[in-house]
């Protein structure tokens, strides 16, 4: 059963336009498991990397976002599971609410399990539990193999720490800097400023 109780507990879903849960059907993914990377201009600008697994979006906060350079190790912090429908969320979380700020769908696509060479790789949920995830992303801005590696377990006052690393494959490119050169939403083509302005004019 998908469990997004933490997600629901830390938000006032009457006050934020974020989805309250439920299923979602992504015509851009052909029924395959999805990933989404949302750029979130909150108190600290960051990227939220989310992978569909076990009926939810497993989520990491990645301050600098993904790199296409295998020599970059991008710090990531595990955060609460989000409902699948969150993959379609782009908009403004109001002042005073959890995560207040603007959310832009920076990249998305289908992904596949890329662990090992065999036909029967361990499920991504097991890989997350074990702290070493291997996936092949098919996004518009980032693609190819990515690893998520846990470097510190959860304890009472700190979230799990992970690293997000591009694998050295044909999709690796040390010169591309997509977080700098490709800032717009892949869903709407809008910039963070445009998303903010639109919400303002909606009243
Ligand atoms: Mn966020």
Image (spheres, helix red, strand yellow):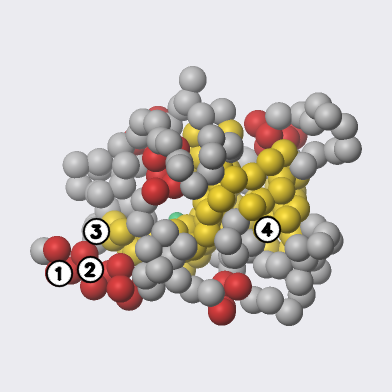
Return the mark for residue 143. 4
Badge 3 vs badge 4, beta-carbon distance below 8 Å: no
Q: Residue furthest right?
A: 117
Rendering coords of residue 86 (x, y %): 40, 44
Tell me what residue is drawn at x 33 percent, y 63 percent: 101
Look at the numbered disc 3 and give the secondary structure of its residue. Answer: loop
Q: Name the residue under label 1.
A: 201
Look at the numbered disc 4 and give the secondary structure of its residue. Answer: strand
Mark 1 surroundings: few (<14), some (14-19) or many (≥20) residues within 10 A: few
Rendering coords of residue 36 (x, y %): 52, 51
Badge 1 vs badge 2, beta-carbon distance below 8 Å: yes
Taking 76 as reference, is 155 above or below it? above
Q: How far apart are marks 3 and 2 (CA)?
A: 14 Å
Q: Name the residue under label 2.
A: 198
Residue 41: name its quadrant. bottom left
Q: Earlier in the sequence, mark 3 or mark 1?
A: 3
Return the mark for residue 94. 3
Residue 92 visible, this angle = yes
Look at the numbered disc 1 and give the secondary structure of its residue. Answer: helix
Nearer to us: label 3 or label 4: 4
Mark 3 surroundings: few (<14), some (14-19) or many (≥20) residues within 10 A: some
Mark 2 surroundings: few (<14), some (14-19) or many (≥20) residues within 10 A: few
Nearer to us: label 3 or label 2: 2
Q: Which of marks 3 and 2 is nearer the N terminus?
A: 3
Rendering coords of residue 61 (x, y %): 54, 55
Q: How far apart are marks 1 and 2 (CA)?
A: 5 Å
Residue 200: name its quadrant. bottom left
Q: Distance between the residues labelled 3 and 1?
A: 14 Å
Badge 3 vs badge 2, beta-carbon distance below 8 Å: no
């Amino acid at each position: 059963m998908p469990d997004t109780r933490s997600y629901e507990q830390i938000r006032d879903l009457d006050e934020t336009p974020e989805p309250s849960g439920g299923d979602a059907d992504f015509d851009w993914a052909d029924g395959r498991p999805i990933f989404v990377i949302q750029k979130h201009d909150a108190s600290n600008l960051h990227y939220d990397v989310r992978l569909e697994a076990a009926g939810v979006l497993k989520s990491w906060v990645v301050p600098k976002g993904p790199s296409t350079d295998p020599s970059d190790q991008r710090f990531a912090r595990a955060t609460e599971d989000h409902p699948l429908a969150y993959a379609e969320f782009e908009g403004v979380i109001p002042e005073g609410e959890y995560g207040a700020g603007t959310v832009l769908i920076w990249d998305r696509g289908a992904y596949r399990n890329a662990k090992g060479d065999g036909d029967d790789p361990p499920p991504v949920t097991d890989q997350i539990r074990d702290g070493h995830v291997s996936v092949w992303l098919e996004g518009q801005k980032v693609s190819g193999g990515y690893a998520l590696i846990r470097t510190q377990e959860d304890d009472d006052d700190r979230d799990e720490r992970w690293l997000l690393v591009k694998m050295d494959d044909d999709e690796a490119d040390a010169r591309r800097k997509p977080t700098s050169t490709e800032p717009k939403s892949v869903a709407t083509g809008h910039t963070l400023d445009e998303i903010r302005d639109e919400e303002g004019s909606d009243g």
